Amino acid sequence: MKILTVCGNGIGSSLMLAMKVDEICKENNIKADVESTDFDSAKGKKADLLITIKELAVQLEGRNVAIVRSYTNKEKIIEDVLDKIKETYEKVK
Amino acid sequence: MIKELLSETTIEVNFKATSWESAVRESGELLKKAGKVNSLYIDEMVKGVKELGPYIVISKNIAMPHARPEEGSNGIGVSLITLKTPINFGNKENDPVKAVVGFSAKDNKSHIELLSELMQLFEDEDFHKIINKANSKEEIKKFILEKDFK
């Protein structure tokens, strides 16, 4: 499964989020290739799931997006997106 | 990484910011003094917040402004300023900002260790305490040097 974490620049918040999402996937036995990217590039990249904050998610119409409240707080990230990660994984594996 | 990168030049305490923009510019100026970025990068740090919103307030009371490597960065760098008076950046969850941690990278990945260390700091209650009360660069530098990063 391909997951893209998205922020404005692709090298700060989204990279931190990618590290957390990667840990969470491993802890839940989910095989995922997690990559961070900037918002503009995200529009042109293929992925099974995009994870980002609300302000950017609303601009990614037609994509499978999960919304996080925090790029770094692992508990909040799990609460916000683990279900959607599992759901997407079931569909694509 | 962060233990080597944060120094006299790249730490400042109790900066009197008149706006979020002046706080971001100051963090950029420290990176510039350390030879890590040029003036264009500082402009891009500010532009990023204006165009994409205050998502850079990434943790409670902490903002992490930055721009893309090709926008004027010479390498991996980090700066830390604490603000004398906390300022709102417009991020409802994490405002007001008390510390601004600016950084620069040279590509998409090689600064990953620095980011991991920053994440550990942002999750450390003691770090939050020290940025609220430190009155000298030395206190902050000491905290960072003594922290056991994984």
Image (cartoon, coloured by chain):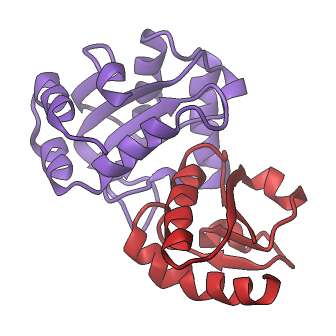
Chain colours: A red, B purple
Numbered disc total: 0
B88 in relation to B99, above or below: below
Give the left or right position of residue B125, taking residue B29 as reference. left
Whole-percent x and y of residue A51? Answer: 65, 69
- Residue B133 falls in which quadrant of the image? top left
* Viewer-proximal residue among B31 and A24: A24
Q: Left or right? Give the position of B14 relative to A37.
A: left
Q: Where is residue B137 in the image (x, y as percent from the top left)?
A: 17, 24
Residue B15 location, quadrant: top left
Q: Can residue B97 be seen in this view?
A: no
Is B8 situated left or right of A31 in this image? left
Question: In which quadrant will I find the N terminus of chain B?
Answer: top left
Classify B108 as above or below B39. below
Residue at figure coordinates x 13%, y 28% from the top left? B142
Q: Position of residue B51 (x, y in %)?
A: 67, 49
Up the image or down, B1 lies above or below A3; here it is above
Residue B125 screen position, x and y as percent: 18, 57
Determine if residue A23 is in view. yes
> In the displayed structure, does residue B109 sit left or right of residue B138?
right
| Identity of the residue drawn at 56% across and 72% down | A25
Nearer to the camera, A35 or A54: A35
Residue at (71%, 51%) from the top-left corner? A37
Position of the C terminus of chain B, as image quadrant, is top left
Q: Nearer the viewer, residue B127 or B33?
A: B127
Residue A18 lies, with reference to residue A26, above or below; the image says above
